[in-house]
Amino acid sequence: MINSLLEETKIIRSIGYDQHEIILDIIHLHCPGGIELDPTYNKGGFYKHSGIPRPRYCFDINPIRPECEKADCRQLPLLAGSIRSMIFDPPFLAGGGSNGQMIIKYSGIKTMPELHSLYKDSLKEFSRVLIHRGILIFKCQDSAHGQRNYFTHVWVMNKAEEYGFEAIDLFVKLSKRVFIAWNHTPENQHYARKYHCYFWVFKKVLEFPQ
Protein backbone atom coordinates (compact mmCIF):
# COMPACT_ATOMS: atom_id res chain seq x y z
CA MET A 1 0.00 0.00 0.00
CA ILE A 2 2.70 2.48 1.03
CA ASN A 3 5.01 1.50 -1.85
CA SER A 4 2.23 1.84 -4.43
CA LEU A 5 1.31 5.26 -3.01
CA LEU A 6 4.94 6.39 -3.24
CA GLU A 7 5.10 5.27 -6.87
CA GLU A 8 1.84 7.02 -7.75
CA THR A 9 2.94 10.32 -6.18
CA LYS A 10 6.55 9.93 -7.46
CA ILE A 11 8.08 10.58 -4.07
CA ILE A 12 11.87 10.37 -4.15
CA ARG A 13 13.02 8.20 -1.25
CA SER A 14 16.27 8.38 0.70
CA ILE A 15 16.91 4.63 0.32
CA GLY A 16 17.05 2.23 -2.60
CA TYR A 17 18.72 -0.87 -4.05
CA ASP A 18 19.55 0.61 -7.46
CA GLN A 19 22.41 3.12 -7.55
CA HIS A 20 21.41 4.31 -11.02
CA GLU A 21 17.95 5.20 -9.75
CA ILE A 22 19.52 7.03 -6.80
CA ILE A 23 21.81 9.05 -9.07
CA LEU A 24 18.91 9.93 -11.38
CA ASP A 25 16.93 11.11 -8.34
CA ILE A 26 19.87 13.26 -7.23
CA ILE A 27 20.13 14.77 -10.71
CA HIS A 28 16.40 15.52 -10.68
CA LEU A 29 16.54 17.23 -7.29
CA HIS A 30 19.92 18.94 -7.27
CA CYS A 31 21.56 19.17 -10.71
CA PRO A 32 18.89 19.09 -13.43
CA GLY A 33 21.51 20.09 -15.98
CA GLY A 34 23.22 16.73 -15.44
CA ILE A 35 26.62 15.72 -14.08
CA GLU A 36 29.49 17.59 -15.70
CA LEU A 37 32.54 15.81 -14.24
CA ASP A 38 33.51 12.30 -13.15
CA PRO A 39 37.16 12.25 -11.95
CA THR A 40 37.17 8.50 -11.10
CA TYR A 41 35.50 7.18 -14.24
CA ASN A 42 36.96 3.64 -14.25
CA LYS A 43 34.83 1.69 -16.79
CA GLY A 44 31.98 4.20 -16.76
CA GLY A 45 29.60 1.82 -15.03
CA PHE A 46 27.32 4.62 -13.85
CA TYR A 47 26.38 5.45 -17.45
CA LYS A 48 25.87 2.05 -19.10
CA HIS A 49 22.22 1.35 -19.92
CA SER A 50 21.17 3.52 -16.99
CA GLY A 51 19.71 6.64 -18.56
CA ILE A 52 22.39 8.74 -16.85
CA PRO A 53 24.13 10.95 -19.45
CA ARG A 54 27.90 10.60 -19.53
CA PRO A 55 29.62 13.68 -18.09
CA ARG A 56 31.41 16.12 -20.34
CA TYR A 57 34.67 15.56 -18.44
CA CYS A 58 35.73 11.99 -17.63
CA PHE A 59 39.06 11.31 -15.94
CA ASP A 60 40.81 8.40 -14.27
CA ILE A 61 44.29 7.87 -12.88
CA ASN A 62 44.56 4.76 -15.08
CA PRO A 63 42.11 5.15 -17.99
CA ILE A 64 40.47 2.03 -19.37
CA ARG A 65 37.91 3.48 -21.77
CA PRO A 66 38.79 5.65 -24.81
CA GLU A 67 36.36 8.39 -23.75
CA CYS A 68 38.30 8.83 -20.49
CA GLU A 69 41.40 11.03 -20.10
CA LYS A 70 44.28 10.40 -17.71
CA ALA A 71 44.29 12.59 -14.61
CA ASP A 72 44.57 12.29 -10.84
CA CYS A 73 41.40 13.36 -9.01
CA ARG A 74 43.65 15.36 -6.67
CA GLN A 75 45.11 17.45 -9.49
CA LEU A 76 42.63 17.91 -12.32
CA PRO A 77 43.45 19.71 -15.59
CA LEU A 78 40.55 22.11 -15.12
CA LEU A 79 40.26 25.82 -14.40
CA ALA A 80 39.13 27.03 -11.00
CA GLY A 81 35.39 27.55 -10.78
CA SER A 82 34.71 25.84 -14.11
CA ILE A 83 32.47 22.92 -13.04
CA ARG A 84 28.80 23.06 -12.02
CA SER A 85 28.29 19.47 -10.85
CA MET A 86 30.33 16.31 -10.36
CA ILE A 87 30.24 12.79 -8.96
CA PHE A 88 33.05 11.13 -6.99
CA ASP A 89 33.21 7.35 -6.60
CA PRO A 90 36.49 6.72 -4.73
CA PRO A 91 37.79 3.48 -3.19
CA PHE A 92 36.02 2.42 0.00
CA LEU A 93 38.31 0.01 1.79
CA ALA A 94 41.86 0.41 3.09
CA GLY A 95 43.46 -2.78 1.82
CA GLY A 96 41.91 -5.95 0.42
CA GLY A 97 38.19 -6.49 0.08
CA SER A 98 36.03 -6.42 -3.02
CA ASN A 99 37.36 -2.99 -4.01
CA GLY A 100 41.03 -3.85 -3.59
CA GLN A 101 41.97 -3.13 -7.21
CA MET A 102 40.80 0.45 -6.83
CA ILE A 103 43.07 0.85 -3.82
CA ILE A 104 46.09 -0.38 -5.76
CA LYS A 105 45.47 2.23 -8.46
CA TYR A 106 45.87 5.03 -5.94
CA SER A 107 49.54 4.88 -4.96
CA GLY A 108 49.33 1.61 -3.06
CA ILE A 109 47.00 2.86 -0.32
CA LYS A 110 46.92 0.29 2.48
CA THR A 111 45.77 2.12 5.62
CA MET A 112 42.72 4.11 6.62
CA PRO A 113 44.78 7.30 7.24
CA GLU A 114 46.12 7.02 3.68
CA LEU A 115 42.59 6.62 2.36
CA HIS A 116 41.46 9.64 4.37
CA SER A 117 44.36 11.60 2.89
CA LEU A 118 43.10 10.76 -0.60
CA TYR A 119 39.60 11.93 0.32
CA LYS A 120 40.91 15.13 1.92
CA ASP A 121 43.13 16.09 -1.02
CA SER A 122 40.31 15.30 -3.44
CA LEU A 123 37.85 17.49 -1.55
CA LYS A 124 40.33 20.34 -1.66
CA GLU A 125 40.64 19.97 -5.44
CA PHE A 126 36.88 19.72 -5.92
CA SER A 127 36.44 22.92 -3.94
CA ARG A 128 38.82 24.55 -6.42
CA VAL A 129 37.16 23.40 -9.65
CA LEU A 130 33.50 23.78 -8.61
CA ILE A 131 31.63 27.04 -9.03
CA HIS A 132 29.97 28.72 -6.06
CA ARG A 133 26.91 26.61 -5.17
CA GLY A 134 28.24 23.81 -7.37
CA ILE A 135 27.13 20.26 -6.55
CA LEU A 136 29.36 17.38 -5.43
CA ILE A 137 27.92 13.84 -5.25
CA PHE A 138 30.24 11.77 -3.03
CA LYS A 139 29.79 8.00 -2.79
CA CYS A 140 31.27 6.45 0.35
CA GLN A 141 30.92 3.51 2.67
CA ASP A 142 31.58 2.79 6.33
CA SER A 143 33.95 -0.09 7.01
CA ALA A 144 35.45 -2.29 9.69
CA HIS A 145 39.22 -2.65 9.43
CA GLY A 146 41.74 -3.94 11.94
CA GLN A 147 38.97 -4.75 14.45
CA ARG A 148 37.82 -1.14 14.40
CA ASN A 149 34.66 0.43 12.99
CA TYR A 150 35.16 3.46 10.73
CA PHE A 151 32.09 5.65 10.21
CA THR A 152 33.47 7.10 7.01
CA HIS A 153 30.31 8.91 5.97
CA VAL A 154 30.53 11.04 9.13
CA TRP A 155 34.21 11.76 8.51
CA VAL A 156 33.46 12.75 4.90
CA MET A 157 30.71 15.17 5.95
CA ASN A 158 32.91 16.84 8.57
CA LYS A 159 35.88 17.13 6.21
CA ALA A 160 33.71 18.44 3.36
CA GLU A 161 32.45 21.22 5.64
CA GLU A 162 36.07 22.20 6.34
CA TYR A 163 36.57 22.69 2.60
CA GLY A 164 33.57 24.94 2.11
CA PHE A 165 30.84 22.41 1.38
CA GLU A 166 27.40 22.12 2.93
CA ALA A 167 25.63 18.75 3.16
CA ILE A 168 22.23 19.18 1.54
CA ASP A 169 21.06 15.58 1.03
CA LEU A 170 21.93 11.97 1.80
CA PHE A 171 20.87 8.78 0.03
CA VAL A 172 21.48 5.24 1.27
CA LYS A 173 21.98 2.40 -1.20
CA LEU A 174 21.08 -0.98 0.27
CA SER A 175 22.62 -4.27 -0.86
CA LYS A 176 20.97 -7.68 -0.81
CA ARG A 177 24.34 -9.44 -0.75
CA VAL A 178 27.90 -8.43 0.12
CA PHE A 179 31.43 -9.81 -0.20
CA ILE A 180 32.17 -12.23 2.66
CA ALA A 181 35.74 -13.19 3.51
CA TRP A 182 36.55 -16.87 2.97
CA ASN A 183 37.65 -17.27 6.60
CA HIS A 184 34.60 -15.59 8.16
CA THR A 185 33.17 -17.21 11.29
CA PRO A 186 30.70 -15.90 13.89
CA GLU A 187 33.56 -15.88 16.40
CA ASN A 188 35.77 -13.49 14.38
CA GLN A 189 33.02 -11.02 13.49
CA HIS A 190 33.29 -7.94 15.72
CA TYR A 191 30.77 -5.56 14.09
CA ALA A 192 27.62 -5.66 12.01
CA ARG A 193 28.28 -6.45 8.35
CA LYS A 194 27.77 -3.39 6.16
CA TYR A 195 24.89 -3.86 3.71
CA HIS A 196 24.72 -0.24 2.59
CA CYS A 197 26.69 2.67 1.22
CA TYR A 198 25.99 6.38 0.95
CA PHE A 199 25.57 9.04 -1.69
CA TRP A 200 26.24 12.42 -0.09
CA VAL A 201 25.09 15.54 -1.91
CA PHE A 202 27.20 18.58 -1.05
CA LYS A 203 26.89 22.18 -2.21
CA LYS A 204 29.91 24.47 -2.33
CA VAL A 205 29.00 27.50 -0.24
CA LEU A 206 32.40 28.94 0.73
CA GLU A 207 35.70 29.47 -1.05
CA PHE A 208 38.55 27.46 0.45
CA PRO A 209 42.00 29.11 0.27
CA GLN A 210 44.19 27.11 -2.11
Image: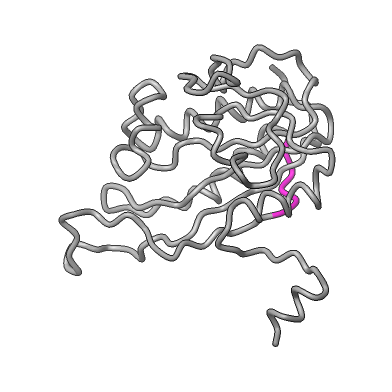
**For the magenta stretch, what is the residue range?**
165-169
Residue 194 position in % (x across, y down): 41, 60
181 left or right of 49?
A: left
30 left or right of 200?
A: right
61 left or right of 131?
A: left
Q: What residue appears at the point 31 percent right and 44 percent down from the top-left corner?
A: 97
Q: Is residue 168 magenta?
A: yes
Q: For residue 181, what is the image quadrant? A: bottom left
Task: State the residue lying farthest toward the front.
Answer: 49
| Number of marks in the rendered image | 0
Residue 103 position in % (x across, y down): 38, 31
Q: What residue appears at the point 72 percent right and 20 percent down from the top-left corner?
A: 209
Quadrant location of the C terminus in the rendered image: top right
Render colour scheme: one colour
Residue 63's place in the image compared with 166, above or below, is: above
Q: For residue 79, what is the image quadrant? A: top right
Q: What residue appears at the point 54 percent right and 39 percent down from the top-left corner?
A: 45
Residue 201 position in % (x across, y down): 70, 47
Magenta segment main secondary structure: strand
Task: State the residue lying farthest toward the bottom.
Answer: 1
Q: What residue appears at the point 46 percent right and 61 percent down from the top-left corner?
A: 175
Residue 148's place in the image compared with 206, above or below, is: below
Q: Does the magenta stretch include residue 155?
A: no
Quadrant location of the N terminus in the rendered image: bottom right
